Every structure is written in structure tokens, then in C-alpha cells.
Amino acid sequence: MTSPALVGSASPAMLVLEDGTTFRGTSFGADGETFGEMVFNTGMTGYQETLTDPSYARQIVAMTAPHIGNTGVNDTDPESRRIWVSGYVVREPARLASSWRAQRSLQAELAAQGVTGIAMNGTRALTRHLRDRGAMRAGITSGPADPAELLERVLASPQMTGADLARDVSTPRPYVIHPPDDTPFRFRVVAVDLGIKAATPRAMAALGCEVQVVPATATAPEILAASPDGVFFSNGPGDPAAIGYAVDAIRGVIAASTPVFGICLGSQVLGRALGLGTYKLRFGHRGVNQPVQDLRTGRVQITSHNHGFAVALPDAGPGRDRAGRAFQTDFGPAEITHLNLNDGVVEGLRLRAAPAFGVQYHPEAAPGPHDASGLFGEFCDLMEGTRRA
């Protein structure tokens, strides 16, 4: 499959999927060659937050919105210390950064951070192909290239299944986010950084939480030594089945009756800690428009997602039949609390007799809608209730 060049003087570029499907376009970002899992994001905004989300480590991200880069890049909106995507695919890159907040162009930022991308007309065809065939490995190269030779290098690149990437993206040392000066201190939270976004501890700090962010490999005794009122397990990249150290940590925290809240990868880790399996989704959920239903209330939220794995239901049968039905764990009864209305994927779970819950999406919504921002308040209520007990 071919696509004409879009940016006049840019060098030619090529994208090859592991099934041999080939797209041609022009170089966008840094010249070079890159490999990763090919995925797509359906958000129409928030590309800077997407690029700097550690959950996208070792992935080539295609944007389904046709025009990317018009607001440029600034030093305020990044969600981490660097761009994490392996490669970037857009249809038509903006030629001008028109926002008053822009400090440089997206093209310049990608080039400065060594991120290889491609601009091509075939992003719709690419997205449909991934929906039909599933996420797969891919490679982008700039300059003249032989598709067959690039395909060989794609097939030699690592798979996402079995990948432990949380420790690669995590903070190397602890740090603390304090509540704003005008916000009274309420709780001490330890946040285990499996690939945390900057907006997440800020959201908790705005509610009066002092948030100590610790590395992904922190053990339960190390976490509990800080005497936290609650422990948060963040989003992150890779396969939840490959990070048994996080599963052990969350089990130790639950056993100590300390409140736990997990999101995205953290929710998958919670599921595994409760004895559930996890599996790789066909093409994942990535974007800001995923409908999720709270089975306890029937209420639907439009939510921000970025995950390629999910928690398996505790027994056979349609997901929507799980409402109000408990399953047994080492920590007492638990239940599925949220489901994705597009495909029935588990989006939330909680323990009934212990203070622990998780959701498979981003309540901080950076970027995205703020329907689920109240979940941080639920975490605070859980800590308050445990403190009084």
C-alpha cells in the first residue's frame, strides 16, 4: 500500500508491518529507523500528552485525527521527562504552530528527541487494518529502503507480550508532590510508579494528598515503611504478567489493610493479585472516547484510555452478567464494578471486605474528558473511612 509524499522537501519514509503490509510517505521527526508495536490513538487532541505518556513505551503510535501539530509543543504539558513512543505516524503534520502557548513545533521536538516518524495519507487504511488484524510489530525507516529487508528487521524486534517495561520507565528515585499552599494536608499517599503521568499525583495533591512517588520495584515493606494512608499503583507499559514484583507488592499492601487504588496497569496488577488472569487485547483501547459503565449505578462515563492488556473475567459468560456477583479471592469476596460498553472488557474491580479497588482508565484525563475525575475523591473517602475504622 502506498501513499504520496505530503511535505514538499522531506525525505521519503516507509512503514512496514509484521504481516508485510507496506505504507510509503515522507519523513516526520528524526531521520533514522525505529521499531515497536503498531497501535492507533483516536484522540483529536492531546498529542503532546500522548507522546510523553510512559504507557506508550516501545510502541509506534498512529493518530487517527488527520491534522496533528497545530498547537505546537510547550514545556508545561508533558506528562513525563521525555517522549516515550518509539515512532509516530500522522496523516498531515501542521506546517505552523498557531497556539500562543507553543514554544516550538512538533517536528522540531520529535527531531530533538530522536523520534522517527512518517507522514502519510494511509492512516485510515492503517487503522482499519489494525482493527481487522490486531496490533502487531512494525518498523519505520527514512530514506530509500527495501521493504523485504525492513520486514526482516521488524520480525526480529521484540514482542510486547512478556515485556517488563515498567522498571524501564519508572522514576529511578523517590520524589514528593505536596498539596498546593492553599490546600490543607489530609493524607499521605505512596504512588508506585509503573509509568505514572505527571497529572496523576497533581490531581491527588489538589485533594490534600502528599504523594510520595516510588520506583516500580518498591516492595511492600518499603512502601509500608512510609506509613501511608493509602497506596496508588499507576498506569504503565508492557505485560502485567511480566511484573510479578508489583503483584507481590500489592498483595502485601492489601494484607496490611492499607487502602489501594490502581489504574490501568495498576488495575491489571490488582486483578492478578486477586487471582485473575490477564490477556492481550486484539488492538487495545487508546483514545479519549471510551464508554464505561459503572455496574453498581448504571451510570456511563466517557473515559480516557491507553492499554493493550486487560483483566480476564473470573468465570465464563458475558461480562454484563457480572453485575453484583462476587468471586472469591485470598482477601475475601471481590466484584467486577465497571465494563467497557464497546466490547465488554473489564474496566473496574474492587474487594468487598478490604479497602482496594482499581479502574482500567485514566481519571486524571490528560488528555480527555473529566467524567471519571471523582475517582480520586473515592480514594480519599476510602482512606478516610479506613482511618476512622
Image (spheres, rainbow, N blue to C red):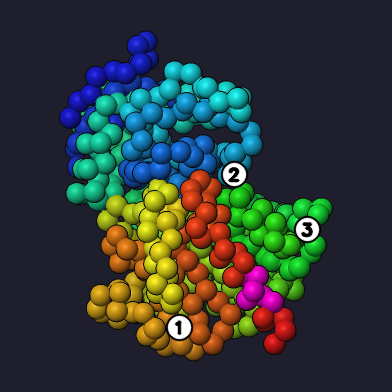
Secondary structure found at label 2? loop
- Name which of mark 3 and mark 2 comes first in the sequence: 2
Tell which circle, 2 or 1, labels the residue nearer the N-terminal end. Answer: 2
Q: Nearer the viewer, mark 3 or mark 2?
A: 3
Identity of the residue drawn at 33% across and 79% down:
322
Assess whether residue 24 is covered by the magenta stretch.
no
Give the residue at x 43% y 77%: 296
Q: CA distance from mark 3 to mark 2?
A: 24 Å
List the residue tagged with mark 2.
Answer: 80
> Which residue corresponds to the image point at 29% horizontal and 23% vertical from the top-left?
25
**From this viewpoint, is residue 249 visible?**
no
Give the answer, above or below, for where 257 lies relative to 288: below
Q: Crowdedness of circle 3 by 10 Å Cα count: few (<14), some, many (20+)?
A: few
Can see residue 303?
A: yes
Q: Nearer the viewer, mark 2 or mark 1?
A: 1
Badge 2 amino acid: Ser
User: Percent x, y for residue 157?
Assistant: 34, 43
Precedes in sequence: disc 1 or disc 3? 3
Which label sits in the foreground, 1 or 3? 3
Front-most of residues 339 and 127: 339
Which image quadrant is residue 254 in? Answer: bottom right
| Callout 1 secondary element | strand
Mark 3: which amino acid? Thr
Residue topped by disc 3: 183
Residue 209: quadrant of the picture: bottom right
Q: CA distance from mark 1 to mark 3?
A: 34 Å
Tag of residue 334: 1
- The answer to whether 349 appears left or right of 355 in the picture is left
Left or right, 103 with reference to 311: right
Does the magenta stretch mainly form a helix, a strand or a loop?
Answer: helix
Can you say which quadrant of the picture contains the C terminus?
Answer: bottom right
Q: Which residues are magenta?
A: 379-384
